[in-house]
Image: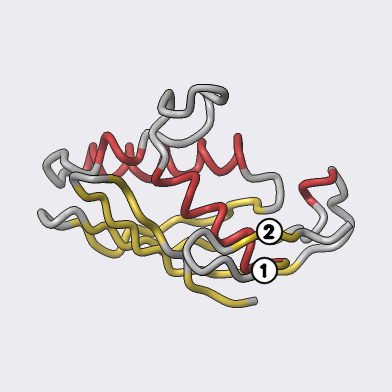
Amino acid sequence: MARIGIHRVTGEVLTGWAHCAQSIGIILTTAIGSLIMARDFGADVPSLIDAPASARVVLALMSATAQALAKDEPGFKLTKVQILSLDGTGLAQFTLAGVFYPNGHLGDYSVSSQVSASVPVTLQAFGARAAVRGGL
């Protein structure tokens, strides 16, 4: 069964990479422990955004991204994460590269394609938002 879901804002049907990209954004902006029935879901990324931009924080952000995606997104295997910018407004810009498995959510890794995505993540006082833009 192909990957399918609903766009979290518009309600449109999402399939394939578009659904996976949305999931990546949700994972990266959900703080670990914030979902009552899924306490281990999410990433440490939200807790790092307000930290001073230093080499240690950048490395921790890259590590938190890789760990969260490996744990929570079976349809995407991260091969490269590059942080393009971090600023005081709460915006972090990533480029993620990896392998998309259309049936990875079913445990089927026989079909794959290389993908690269731009991930602007904005964390605000009233919640987090992320949009993943990229193509196959």
From the viewer's perspective, is 98 left or right of 51? right
Q: Amino acid at mark 1?
A: Val
Task: Single out the residue that lies furthest toward the front.
Answer: 11
Total label count?
Answer: 2
State which tag comes first along the sequence, 1 or 2.
Answer: 2
State the SS at label 1. strand
Figure quadrant of residue 119: bottom left
Residue 42 coordinates in the image, percent (x, y): 48, 36
Q: Quadrant of residue 16?
A: bottom right
* The residue positioned farthest toward the bottom in the image shown: 135
SS category of the residue bearing label 2: strand
Q: Is residue 98 above or below residue 70?
A: below
Disc 2 residue type (three-letter): Gly
**Viewer-proximal residue, 124 or 73?**
124
- The circle drawn on residue 5 is 2
Q: Residues within 10 Å of mark 1 (few under 14, many from 20)?
A: few
Instruction: Name the residue at 33% across, 37% down.
Output: 60
Q: Residue at x 57, y 63 (%)?
A: 7
What x and y, as percent, mark residue 6?
63, 61
Q: What residue lies at 48% left-to-right and 72% top-to-bottom?
A: 133
93 or 121, which is in the foreground? 121
24 up-or-down from 113: above or below: above
Classify residue 84 as left or right of residue 18: left
Q: Nearer the viewer, residue 44 or 22?
A: 22
Q: Tag on residue 30?
A: none
Determine which residue is flagged by label 1: 13
The percent position of residue 69, horizontal first and vertical second, equals: 56, 43
Q: CA distance from mark 1 to mark 2?
A: 6 Å
Query: Are the residues flagged by discs 1 and 2 in contact, CB closer than 8 Å?
Result: yes
Q: Dot 2: within a 10 Å radius of its alpha carbon, few (fewer than 14), some, or many (20 or more) residues? A: some
For the C terminus, which image quadrant? bottom right
Residue 43 x %, y %: 43, 36
